[in-house]
Amino acid sequence: MPREWSARVVQQVIARSLYVTRWFDLSALPKSERIGAVQAQLAVWQPFEFCDYRVVLHEGGALAFAWDAREFEARRARCREARFANPGLLPETLLNAPLRAGARVVQGLDGFAGEFWDGGILKGSSYWPELPSADEWLNFLRGASAPPALHDVPVSAALQSADWLRLPWARLASARDLSGANRRVERVAVAGGVVLLVALAAQLAGDARSLSKRETAAAEKLVRIKREAQPVIAARDAAQAALPRLEALAKSLDTVSALSLLAHLTAVMPKDAVIRDLDFDGLKLKLGLSIPESVSRLECLKALRSEPWFGEVREASGGQKSLIRLEITLTGLAAPQPVPPQSAAASADAPSGKDEAAGEAKVVAGRGDTKKSLEVKR
């Protein structure tokens, strides 16, 4: 160091051989978290048993300088005896003019320092007591992640003498400075959080008022809709109440009327014939008819076929001498025309309509709602 500075020195310059450096890249972290991240990194990085450090803070990271705290405490004591008022510690690197970009070997106070600069930031540094060999220089460049173009620069071309500055090119921050800066960041963050919470609360209050108004409007609209829909609801309830009756009526219309079928049978079957059994399912009838000996089966079939409602009449198996079994297919659910009047002779011998209605008839439950069994004597 130039001799004319000695009378004005208020900081103790640390030779490059007595400290180590390290660059911490924090560009991926939010700005509010970077100081805390630096403190965490320094707590892990301990190159000496009793370590002291100073930090140069950059936009995207931090450059740290670390040395043996015990050795420099003794040096501080000697400075105080020489009537220096608590001198600070200043790494030699900060008094050598920086580079914008590139790599160099600087001959300093007591050796040689390799440096790799990128964007005005010292991102790699190494110390050698003697001029490094070509292999040592290449290994340093690779370890500092220098671009391959710099690997071909020989040591002799990169060698420079120190370009001393009157003032350091960056401000150093101690552990206390980092803690204070971190507290300031925390206070700013807390203040920003409070402002954000107040803004959020105001927004939520506005949203709540808007929601309350919409709920009130929706409730009023619902009351109006219910009032307007009351006649429709009443009509719907009435229709639902009448639905079972309508279904029963529709079901009755879809089946053959047992009384109508009985009336048509008694109107056309031979005199003294007796219906022993009758089953019907839809338009299919099965009939068991007991006839007197004076009436032939052919006459019985002919009499039944004279009824237009009976579309197909045929004799089925299982009959006996006086019992004829018939299968009849109806032409529809109801008779196509009124029962034709009987002949005059038959009318004279047959009972009147009232007598037929009052005649002997026995109806027995059959195979369900759509089937009936009847026994009728004419």
Image: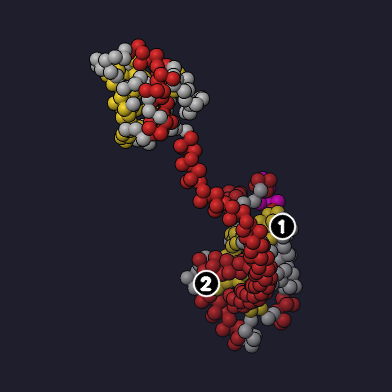
**Quadrant assignment, res 305:** top left
Residue carrying label 2: 51
Q: Are marks 2 and 1 in contact (CB under 8 Å)?
A: no
Q: Which residues are magenta?
A: 152-157
Please tell me whether residue 162 belongs to the stretch shown in magenta: no
Q: Which quarter of the rendering shows the C terminus?
A: top left
**Quadrant assignment, res 92:** bottom right
Q: Is residue 68 above or below residue 262?
A: below
Residue carrying label 1: 119
- Which amino acid lies under the numbered mark 1 shown in the image of this protein? Gly
Identity of the residue drawn at 34% across and 32% down: 359
Q: Position of residue 194 (x, y in %)?
A: 64, 75
Q: Is residue 64 above or below residue 340?
A: below
Is 207 in front, or is 87? 207
- Mark 2 residue element: strand
Count residues near mark 2 (Cα–Cα under 10 Å), then give few for <14, some for 14-19, many for 20+: some
- Mark 1 residue element: loop
Q: Main secondary structure of the magenta part?
A: helix
Is 338 in front, or is 309? 338
Q: Position of residue 107 (x, y in %)?
A: 67, 61
Count residues near mark 1 (Cα–Cα under 10 Å), then give few for <14, some for 14-19, many for 20+: few
- Which amino acid lies under the numbered mark 2 shown in the image of this protein? Cys
